Image (cartoon, rainbow, N blue to C red):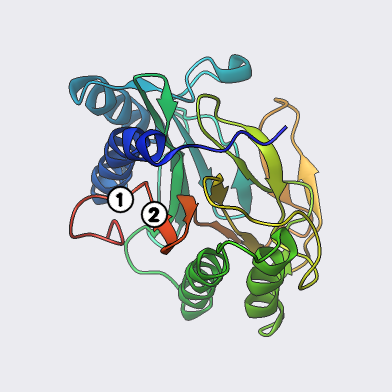
Amino acid sequence: MIIKKSAAEIEAMKEAGRISAKVLREVGALVKPGVSTLELDEFAEALIRLEGGIPAFKGYGGFPGSICASVNEQIVHGIPSSKVVLKAGDIISIDTGAIVDGWVGDNAWTYAVGSISPEKKRLLEVTEKCMWAGIEAARPGNRLGDIGYAVQSVAEAVGYGVVREYVGHGIGRNMHEDPNVPNFGRRHCGIKLEEGMVIAIEPMINMGTHKTRQMSDGWLVCTRDGKPSAHFEKTVAVTGDGPVILTCEEGRSRPV
């Protein structure tokens, strides 16, 4: 069941969104060679709590971290670890969120570690473009397929693979609510978007095949062919004035 939010509830979600965005930006600023993903996680948890939030990911389904930290060919759900130390040339997808007054914020960004190859740079640029295209389609009267089509068109135009098994989602009092928001689809198909729907739009785009593999810890998902993947995400409200991004800081549309 899709739980639509009132204008007041959407307004109330903005504080969780602000904290989620601030944490994503400040964690991103710490990304550099020699830093472990556990250090990033510990910083994120401390900042979420300092800002008055609760880490949305920690304990969710048993997940041990406050961020997902997924490096290179890792797509999503990487568990932070002292053993995963970033190296120059890596890319890292950070996914994090905060709960404030029972409302959840959820956002992600893929960062370069030092200087990266032109191929990885392009992957990041295209995946971010996919996210913005999906957000632009999140308007009343459009359908879920319009979001998926917008994302898929940008990615496949340059030969990238769009992950099928993991998708965006509704969000509100719970991190994952109806509906699922795929990053692929057909125009004018699927559930009609209505004012008051709040969704997480999160393209996961692979440099090679769209196929994935689940790793042995039950969380980490990697590309089947070992090529890099990128992940960008915003929490977005569908309103009569167009899409409103809830995971943002005032004056900042991007965390970098």
The local secondary structure at tag 2 comes to: strand
Residue lying at 41% horizontally and 19% vertically, measured from the top left: 102
Q: Is residue 6 above or below residue 173?
A: below
Dividing the image into 4 quarters, which one contains the N terminus? top right
Q: Which of the numbered marks, if any, corresponds to residue 248? A: 1
Q: Which of the numbered marks, if any, corresponds to residue 245? A: 2
Q: Position of residue 225 (x, y in %)?
A: 77, 60
- Identify which amino acid the numbered label 2 is placed on: Ile
Dividing the image into 4 quarters, which one contains the C terminus? bottom left
Please state which of residues 115 and 185 is positioned toward the viewer in this rendering.
Answer: 185
Please state which of residues 16 and 58 is positioned toward the viewer in this rendering.
Answer: 16
Q: Quadrant of residue 158?
A: bottom right
Left or right of 244 on screen, residue 160 = right
Q: Are marks 1 and 2 in contact (CB under 8 Å)?
A: yes
Residue lying at 62% horizontally and 32% vertically, measured from the top left: 176
Q: Position of residue 94 (x, y in %)?
A: 44, 45
Please state which of residues 95 and 106 is positioned toward the viewer in this rendering.
Answer: 106
Please state which of residues 95 and 19 is positioned toward the viewer in this rendering.
Answer: 19
Residue lying at 39% horizontally and 42% vertically, measured from the top left: 7
- Identify which amino acid the numbered label 1 is placed on: Cys
Q: Position of residue 206 (x, y in %)?
A: 67, 64
Q: Is residue 216 above or below residue 136?
A: above
